[in-house]
Image: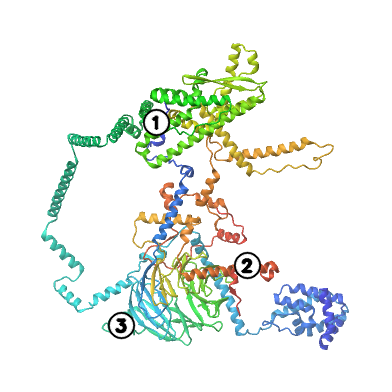
Amino acid sequence: MGKKVKGNTSASKVNQDSNEKDLHSKMLDQIGLSVSDSKNIAKDSNKKSKHSNKKAERQQENVVDFDQEFMDDDEGGDQQLTLGDIFQSIGVSKLSEKEQKSKNNDTINASKLQKQIKELRKDAEKNPAISQPLTGRKRLQIEREQNYKQVQKHMKKWIPQVKENREADYVDFTTTDVIGEGGGVKLNSLNQIASNLKASQATSKLEQQIQQELSRQGLQSENDIKRKEQESLKNVLSSDQLEQRYQQIAQMKSLLFRQEMKNRRISKIKSKLYHKIKKREKDREEKKLIDYLEQIDPQAAQVYREKEEQKKVEERLKQRHASNNKFAKKLKRFGMMENENIRETYNEMMREKNTLKQRTKKVNPFVEDDDSDISDDDSGSEEEDDINAIRKKALKAIQNEIDDDASDDDEENDQSGDDDEEEDESEDEDSDEIDLNFDDQKKSQQKQKKETEKGILGLKFMQRGEERLKEQTKEQAKMLMQQIKEDQEILGLSDEDNNKNNAFVKASNKFGQSKLEIKQLETHNITDDQLKKAAVKLAGSKLNIDNETQNAKNSSKNNDDKKKKDKKQLEVTFDVKEDLKNFKPDNKKVISISKDDQVLRNLFIAPQDEEQAMEEFEKEKDEQIEDELGNKVKAPIVQRGWNEWAGDGVNESNHEKRQARVTEIKKKKIEELKKQRADSKLKGVVLNVEERDKKFAQKYLVKELPHPYKNVKQFEALMNVPIGKDWNTLQSHKRLIQPDVLTKAGTIIKPLKYKKDLPIRMETIEALVEHRHGKREKRPAAKF
Amino acid sequence: MVKVKTICRNEKEYQKQTNNDLLKVYRNPTKAILHPFQKAREYQRAMNAAKLEKIFAKPFIEAMNDHSDGVTVLAKNRYNLVDVISGSADGEIIYWNMGERKSKFIINAHHNFVRGLSFANNKALSADSIFVSSGDDKKVQIWSLQGIKAQYEKNEGLKGFKNYTPRASFLSKHLLHNIDHSYDQNLFATSGSVVQIWSYERSTPLQTFEWGVDTVTKVKFNPSETNIIASVALDRSIVLYDIRGNTALEKIAMKNRCSALCWNPYEPMNFVVGNENSNVYTFDMRKLESAKMIHKDHIQAVLDIDFAPTGREFVTASFDKTIRIFPYNDGRSREVYHTKRMQQVNAILYSMDNNFIISGSEDTNIRIWKSHAADPMKPMLPREKEKLAYNEKLKKKYKYNHEVKRILRHRHLPKFIVKKKKVKQIQKISKHKKIENIRKNNRLTDAPYIPDRKKDLDTVQD
């Protein structure tokens, strides 16, 4: 206010015309007010003015510097009352009175002034100023605004209906209030017109003629024609007769058909005798042919005969022990395998079949391959000489064996296959096994020879495969031999080095009937580990090593010796066994080629083995998972801080403790993650969850959360609800597949009509308000 | 021996004591667990449904070729499905019977373009069908189907009789554009240099609305709030009128001219306008300061729009020789129709039973399309219907899934549209980049963020 007052004084000084200036100064003089008093007046007048409307208020403020806007009050279309007006219109007369009064009183109060102003206002209200009419354009503008506001308000009445439609799960446009009574089918208006047209006139002459003719015969309408047709039909046959006729025809047809089918079947049947005769004829012809062949080429005939013989043998075998004979088939088909007894008999049968098969394979004489690649060359030390000798003998023995008897061979093989033999015998058997490789190879070669003649195995790719296998085995055998050799060399070297201190150990090996003894030198310094290694490498051949220390040599009492020997042997063999498992890759192959029976036996793992395998598997699984998770789990690197690098008071243990703590935390985290894995409780299974998830993600998951959904949970909840019949009751299925818009073909859908009985619900308004403020509650994830 | 666990049940649970006893229904609450393949199966079904939709999508029904010049305007009877009339650039009006898909009457109505056609509201079934037409010859004509039929019968022998006389013909002082009949009174409105309201009985307009100087090209009555009229004008403006008052209501201007307009029949406050900038805008007549939604997909000017009678969809005709169907609440089109021979589409209609679309194009043809391309037209067994509904829901459920989406969204388009679309995309990206750069290097006030819904509006000069 102070400012304004200042403004008015300055303004009065500067820019006003002399009249006003005079008036003002005069007035002030007359009233006898100081500047501060005039302030008060202004304040009061402002307070009063708050009651009047806005424009007036604005004017009122201006009044303070009334010298400026004193006179020009008719600004704006409608004239509002201003204090200026008051002063101007009434003030002259009344003020003059008051001035006189004040002259009398000499001093004047603010309250008195207030009263005066009140009076003034009352007067003004009694006779307000008349506003000027607006120009056309302006008026239109205001009218438009008003109209628009009205319409806006009016349109609100539609909101509930629109909202209801929008939020509905489905909108039904087949109800009567949409399509109207009578179903709303309005297809026929033109049809009506068209029918009218037709009824009135037929268009062409021909049609007219036809119509005339029809009308003459009394067939004007469609119904007449129909009736006539029916009558004419009735005259020919009665319905009963017709039915009888149809039945007869059907009977005849079925009889004919049956006869035909019968004939067809009969023509197919052939008697046993017929087949016998046929077979005999066939045999006779064959014999003739063979005889003829004998004359021309006796060798070929021989070959042919052998072939035939073999075929017959096979046939016989198949008949009795085939896995696909009638008996076996039935077993499989009707689930009789579950019966233990029957299964046993079946297995027995199969076993028999296998042995028989092998025997038949061995029946044929075989020729030894001279160029077997397993030939070995260098033999420096005595041991190697020994080994060579063993080898040679083994070869011979195998030959003999094969020549001798098949059944013997079988027995031997069985024995040699066994790992769990008695100690005494093991020597024999194991030494046997050194050369199992060779043995096997030869056998496989024999087999191949036989098999090349047979059906499937005679095929080229099979042969090729066989050859490949042969080569592989050869190579493996070579490698093995090399290893053995090397080991022995090492042993030999070490022997040479520690010649004096070393004691010699005799290792005796037997093979078949001929026992062989291998003298093995063992140094005193060779540790058990080294021994193990050597043993492992030799394990392929399963050599039994007899160890004797030098001391044992010196103080050798037979009993003690034997005991020690036994113990050592036990230990070694155990070790060998243990290591065998670690040595799998090589050994397995060796075993796998060893013999059919052994393979079979290996297929059926003993329960102990299974347990072991399980443990191993679990171990492996743990390691694998930990590895995987270890990469994922991030543990802070423990770094040395102050007072941990060097100098006095360095506490190494502190650092270690921290490191330990970190690792422990990491372990815990890993454990937790492990538990979260899907396969944590499944024994013997590793689930590759990530891979699976990846695959799953591509197909079933969405990359981004789609627009209307606010969070993943919401979306997933919706996606998890199945719609199909298979997962829902019929009712809910029908509800779920309800189309969004229901319409009826051929019916008119009328535009929306106003329904009065749908008031704006308060909650909807609240929801709208909330929605506008963004406070709307989250919708439930799913509706059920 | 294996121990066999028998199923044991309490007899009381499944035996009724009396006839009225209710049995407890057992339901498996863990559906998802016991049906581990539920998702996979439904997904597969959704895929199949999507593919089947593609296979069965054959929207085109028929082309009717009786006009000898480009079709400029189409009108449907709002109360039956049979009557459709079309006007062409040579002043002919043809009355079509949609049941037979044949033209019935060819009328020489105007000397120049037929600009507007509209059916009156003949609600009674037996009542005469009345329609009104407007042309470039400044004439407004009122036709009655009965009268036309009578004339046809009278001139039966004359081949190619076209000179039917209308029930009434008024000459307007001003240039005329389209015409639209009111939904509940015997009034109709014409656009042109002014908006005029006419009744059948008077040869001079009852009311005229004028705001600004430029020509109003389209005017449409609101189907539900029947006193309100919306119009678009050549000066890029959209104006609302109320025939109860003497003034217009509100005016907004856009950056480009609007050439099509239609009210939503089930949301009386909303209308859509088709713009020359190839977009369609939804407006709420109460809040015109910004568009409610922009529907983008056309690449050239939108020439005509018609809402489905359900208010759930609208169909647009465009200069780019395609027809598109938009959901009322989606920015992208659901469907696009085009044929090799179809030129720019001037007029479009959505049939009143929500099943068909009728388009009139510059190549003088009127084409009939299905509104849902893959829906069968035959009557269906309940099981068939159920299956289709199930498929529909599956598609809806899995529409966000990549593979399903890909199949459902794929449409074959003419080469020039594909090319233009690519160009548009590039333009959009570069524009965006430019403004982003401006924003980076200037104050925000230099390039403020304005939504497209507001950006495309212009300030009104008034």
**Whole-number angstrom distance, CA of label 1 to CA of label 2:** 86 Å
Q: Which residue: 39% across, 42% down?
A: A460
**Which residue was labeled with disc 2?**
B433
- Horizontally, is B17 left or right of A61 in the view? left
Q: Earlier in the sequence, mark 3 or mark 2?
A: 3
B288 vs B106: above or below: above
The amino acid type, in three-letter code, at marker 1 is: Val
Q: Residue A176, how many percent across, how many down?
A: 40, 63
- Quadrant into which the N terminus of chain A falls: bottom right
**Whole-number angstrom distance, CA of label 3 to CA of label 1:** 107 Å
Q: Is residue B229 visible?
A: no
Query: Which label was assigned to residue B160?
Result: 3
The amino acid type, in three-letter code, at marker 2 is: Lys
Could you confirm whether marks 1 and 2 are on the same chain?
no
- Horizontally, is A214 left or right of A450 in the view? left
Query: Which label was assigned to residue A367?
Result: 1
Q: Residue A482, how many percent across, how many down?
A: 55, 32
Which residue is at the front of the view, A1 or B314? B314
